[in-house]
Every structure is written in C-alpha cells, then in structure tokens.
Image (cartoon, grey):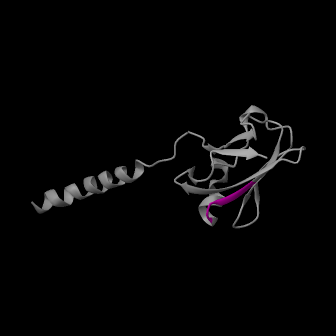
Amino acid sequence: MRRLTIAALPLLLLTAACEEDEVACTEEFRMITPVVVDSTGALVGDFGGRSILRATGDTLHEIHEGSAGPQGFVVVDDLDFDKLHALGGTVDVTLWRATGDSATGTYVIDAKVCHVYLVSGPDTLTLR
C-alpha cells in the first residue's frame, strides 16, 4: 500500500499542475476600445486622444486628431500588460476635436495571466 501511495504522488502533482494551467495565455489579443460619438450619437473618427496610466503619468496610447478612423481609440491593449500588472490599472482617457469638443473617461483595468480585462469604465465616450 505504501508503494502505491508513493507511486501515485507524481500523478497527483501532475493533475494539480494541469488544473492551474487551465488559465493559460492564449493567442487572442485583447484591446479596450470605447465607442466614440458626438452629442447627437453619431460615430466620430476625427478626434485626437490619449490614455495615461495614473500610477506613473506615462502615456499608454495616443492618436492624433483625424487619424482615428472607424476603429476608434485604444485605451489599453495586451502590450500594456506588464505596466498594468505591476503598477495597477487606473487609466485616464482624454479625447478632443478641433471644434473644441472633448470627452474624458476613467478606466479600471485588471491584468492577469497574459491579458487585459475591463473592470469598470464607460463603453461610450461622447465628445461635447
């Protein structure tokens, strides 16, 4: 019986390791991208913007006015994982247009395993 227990120990360790590995990095690439609209609710592509990691003041993403296009604005993506994982994930976003309209939003991002996840923050930013 003692030999059976000793022989089964590596199997139990492997099983436990497999359960932990279920949360593994995937090939998926995640981005947090709010919809950007004007005060009428129409989609906007001619804006500039910046996302800043509150803990350091570092700019994570920046887009120059008029270059956003239909893809919108990336607040954070998986390339920001290391900064967010190490320093916490509050990100402040400011968007603007030449017309003087602007919008701000605060996003709380969780970075676990290999991806970024939205904890809280607006789905839509309205330029007013």
Does the magenta stretch mainly form a helix, a strand or a loop?
strand
Q: Residue 20 placed where, x, y %?
A: 39, 53
Q: Is residue 11 magenta?
A: no
* Residue 67 position (above or below residue 23): above
Q: Residue 36 placed where, x, y %?
A: 72, 41
99 on left or right of 121:
right
* Residue 54 position (above or below residue 76): below
The residue that appears at 86% across and 42% down in the rendered structure is: 65
The residue that appears at 16% across and 60% down in the rendered structure is: 5
Give 58 or 127, whichever is nearer the viewer: 127
Give 98 or 29, whichever is nearer the viewer: 98
Give 46 or 113, whichever is nearer the viewer: 46
* Residue 67 position (above or below residue 80): above
Q: Is residue 92 magenta?
A: yes
Q: Looking at the figure, which quarter contains the N terminus?
A: bottom left
Instruction: Residue at the far left: name it.
Output: 1
Residue 104: quarter of image: bottom right
Instruction: Residue at the far front: name it.
Output: 40
The residue that appears at 69% across and 49% down in the rendered structure is: 75
Q: Residue 106 placed where, x, y %?
A: 67, 57
The residue that appears at 83% across and 42% down in the rendered structure is: 47
* Residue 40 position (above or below residue 93): above
16 on left or right of 40:
left
Give 40 or 63, whichever is nearer the viewer: 40
| The residue stretch that appears in magenta | 88-93
Q: Residue 63 placed where, x, y %?
A: 81, 45
115 on left or right of 126:
left
